[in-house]
Image (spheres, rainbow, N blue to C red):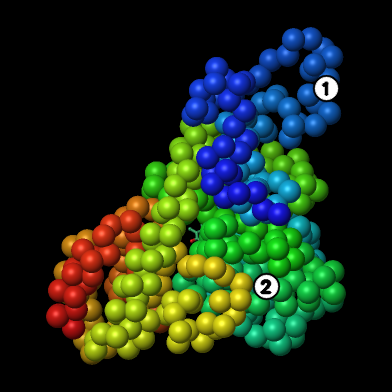
Amino acid sequence: MKEDLSYILNHLGEDREKYFNAVSPPVIQTSNFCFRDLQQFRQAFTDELEHHIYTRGNNPTVAILRKKLAALEGAEDALVLSSGSGAIAAAVISQVKAGDHIVCVQSPYSWTQALLTKLLARFGVTHTFVDGKSMEAITQALQPNTRMLYLESPSSLTFELQDLQACAQLAKERGLVTIIDNSYSSPLFQNPIRHGIDIVVHSGTKYLNGHSDVVMGVICSSREIIKKIFESELMTLGAILQAHDAALAIRGLRTLELRLRRCDESARLIASRLAAHPKVERVTHPLLPGHPQYELARKQMSGTGGLFSAYFKVDEREKMEAFVQELKHFLLAVSWGGHESLILPSVGFYNIPGRQDTHVDWKLVRFYIGLEDPEWLWADLENGLKIL
Ligand SMILES: *Cc1c(COP(=O)(O)O)cnc(C)c1O
């Protein structure tokens, strides 16, 4: 059984007697560790993941964070890296070799897409993007050399889901490894390992740290897979999280549950009001009735957090631009998962010199609802909507 959530967030992994009974863990700001004698030195080298030799490998502050994250996902172990993209790249690379094929959901996170289409393509690893809503499409994309099924459910851009249990079962039958980017749901609202998924990755930059001041990534999996990634990809690529950032993330995690419940409630309130507004064509939020995969979302997710999108009824691009710029309480920015509410309007991707993203639909806005008073946010939106 999963350990009590509040215990994990506030106490698990914190061996306070080791550091003067300080209630907050120390930042062990050191690159190096020394040994009493040769016996201790040799002992450490039997398992670098368990001993302290050098901070690119193991660091005590970082280890506290790893323990909490593994417990949150119900995984045997976890690694933290210096970004979500770094974690995704390390996890994917650890499982493939030249000649292998990856089946990946369509429109994954942009740098995951780049990993497959640009980086891994150069090393002889091929891929097929599929409509992850359809098990038939996934099955049909499998080739004799398919090694991995890469999922992102829900997608943080399109909010499309995959049936995790069905995907895990198919992968087991065909001998594939499954990886999911679980950043959207966080470990609070969806635990893919329980559905049989092998590796869970997160952009810890989002909800896990939650205060928009650390970039980090997480990999959760079996002890065996984590050890393999540690000994090869993590140590070789060296994309580690620094101790100071780990301490900030441990502090951020203390309030994970409080923050996410607040984001979740406020986002549902604002998304429902938007859905009922005459200037809104549709709202895409996995846990509001009307989402095409609502039943599946209810089956495998217990909440959503603050992210959803809205498609507006507007006939001129200039009006859309004016609406976006009229909003005072939503910051215009990429990313999400912090304290502050954000908008990412597709219209922002128009007229960027040297970029051809004009296929994006400019009537679409992605919203992230943070920790502010939802009524204060709603008043701002209602005011802005007068422009459309
Ligand atoms: C932000 C994000 C990432 C990348 O994480 P970084 O920490 O920015 O490298 C990966 N997947 C999803 C769904 C994201 O939102």
Seen at 78% across and 74% down, the residue is 169
Name the one closer to the observer, 388 or 338: 338
- 33 relative to 106, above or below: above
Q: Of circles 1 and 2, which is in front?
A: 2
Does residue 220 appear left or right of residue 253 in this picture?
A: right
Q: Is residue 344 left or right of residue 7?
A: left
Pick the quarter of the image with the N terminus. Answer: bottom right
Between 147 and 286, the one lying in front of the other is: 286
- Residue 164's tag is 2
Secondary structure at badge 2 equals helix
Mark 1 neighbour class, 10 Å CA radius: few under 14, some 14 to 19, many 20 or more: few
Which of the marked residues, 1 or 2, is nearer the chain's N terminus?
A: 1
Tell whether label 2 touches label 1 (CB within 8 Å).
no
The type of residue carrying mark 2 is: Leu
* Image vertical order of residue 53 relative to residue 165, above or below: above
Residue 176 sits in quarter = bottom right
Image x and y of residue 383, in percent: 15, 74
Quarter residue 362 falls in: bottom left
- Residue 254, given in percent of the width and then of the height, sits at 47, 43
Give the residue type that dot 1 points to. Answer: Gln
Label 1 lies in ligand 1 vicinity (Cβ under 8 Å): no
Q: Is residue 118 visible?
A: no
Q: CA distance from mark 1 to mark 2?
A: 41 Å
Residue 102 coordinates in the image, percent (x, y): 72, 70
Q: In the rendered view of the protein, which quadrant contains the C terminus?
A: bottom left
Can I make out residue 15 in this image?
yes
**Would residue 39 be found to the left or right of residue 369 on screen?**
right
> Label 1, on which residue?
43
Q: Residue furthest top?
A: 37
